[in-house]
Amino acid sequence: MTQTERQNDLIDLIGEAEQGFDHYRGMLVEMQNLYFSVMDGSLKEYLKKRNKSSLFFNKAQAKMRRVSDSLVKNYFQNDKFVSIEPEREDTDDAKDAKALQSAIKEELENIKFFDQMSSGLYKLPYIGTLVTRSYWDDGLMVEDVDIDRFFFDPEAKSEQDTGYVVHVVHVTVDDIKRMQRAGVYNREHSIEELVTDTELKGYTRVKLKEIYTKHGDIWKVSTVYDDTYFFRQDVPLKDGLPFNWGGLIRQLRHIDEDTFVGNYFEPFIASIKTLQEEYNVRRNQMIDANKQHLNPKLITGKTSGINPLDLEKPTGHIPAKDPGAIQIQPPPRIDVALQDMQVIDQEMSEISSISPMMNGVAPTSNKTATQTSVEHTEGSLKLEILTRVLNETFF
């Protein structure tokens, strides 16, 4: 295979990985809209035009925050991230284990592992897949990778089956030149000659795509600009693939689904997304109903002689030819919307296993101590399972 043929193959692989992500992009945007409390634009405009309430009551976010808080607590509640124990205490292994334990603790403090991991753990219930990159830069560094800048081999069923991944990076012009001088990038292309649509400065960032391909037990990296110009090609990596990824819930592949990418995990919030949307509808309806109770609609005849502006005044005298012509339009029942909200809230708790009490909210209904204990136990079990799944898939 010639160099040009190999480069064309790598560019094709990048395109296939990006297409694999495109099938999940719309769903991920919808999940993130729940995090940012963003209502559907057309629905919000429809409600505003009719002077109806269009607020977003993010019950789902509170439940997802509880999941993230639990993950952060489980991983960072003490300084001992891993526990190393010797088989026998009366040997030199005990000293070595103690020294290694101390070294790991010191290294984790140096790389600020909490700062890097906590952001990923808080967005994990919304995006489903946690991706990090580890590299050496005067010390071990760990960084969170955005899901829309990391693409998987679409044919892979799992991490072990992955043949290649693609990472989109934005590198400054000065860094590109520095890596060319250091021999990391080749000098075949000058970045100033390639980027002609803007005034380049040293701190200007340029979009590059790095594709990591597996050759037996060896991972190799290639870096390309504009899907055309290669700054390096098939460079072996001494320490293997620098990425880790995992999640909380494995996807379920539909029968005959040809767009399935096995390395993407299902967002935990996806199971209650529709309930959150319905909760918004009912809650806003209740607000509109309250408005009608406080400011009811009045029906008057066209010949009643009543000035509509007089009806809007809270006090004062209203002259009318026929006072009996004024009728109040019956307002909707608030209790119906309230009952629907309570049912939806309960169903969200059942599906997610995160009860309102786990978020510190006092119960609105009379529950026995046994019911409360069962709900708390089920929620704790769910959080333990999620932590175990992340342990097995990510670490």
Image: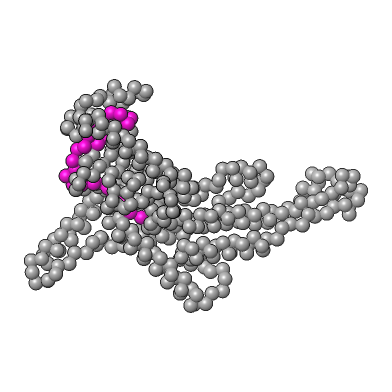
Residue 1 position by quadrant: top left
Asked if residue 191 is positioned above or below residue 129 in the image, the reply reads above
Q: How is the image coloured?
A: one colour
Q: Quadrant of residue 103?
A: bottom left
Is 323 one of the magenta-colored residues? no
Q: Residue 383: give x, y in percent of width and height.
A: 39, 64
Residue 89 lies left or right of residue 200; in this view the side is left
Give the side of residue 264 with respect to residue 216, left or right.
right
In the rendered image, the vertical position of residue 25 relative to residue 82, given as above or below: above
Q: Residue 186, position in %: x, y?
A: 20, 29
Residue at image point 61% right, 56% down: 283
**Residue in view at x 41 percent, y 54 percent:** 253
Residue 166 quadrant: top left
The answer to whether residue 127 is seen in the rendering is yes
Between 212 and 282, the one lying in front of the other is 212
Of all residues, the one furthest to the right in this rendering is 321
Q: Is residue 239 magenta?
A: yes
Question: Percent x, y for residue 372?
Answer: 48, 73
Task: Name the quarter where the C terminus is drawn.
Answer: bottom left
- Outermost front residue: 256
Residue 364 rendering spot, x and y as whole percentages? 56, 68
- Start-end of magenta stretch: 222-247
Depth check, front residue: 61 or 23? 23
Q: Residue at x 69, y 53 (%)?
A: 291
Whether residue 360 is visible here, answered yes or no, is no
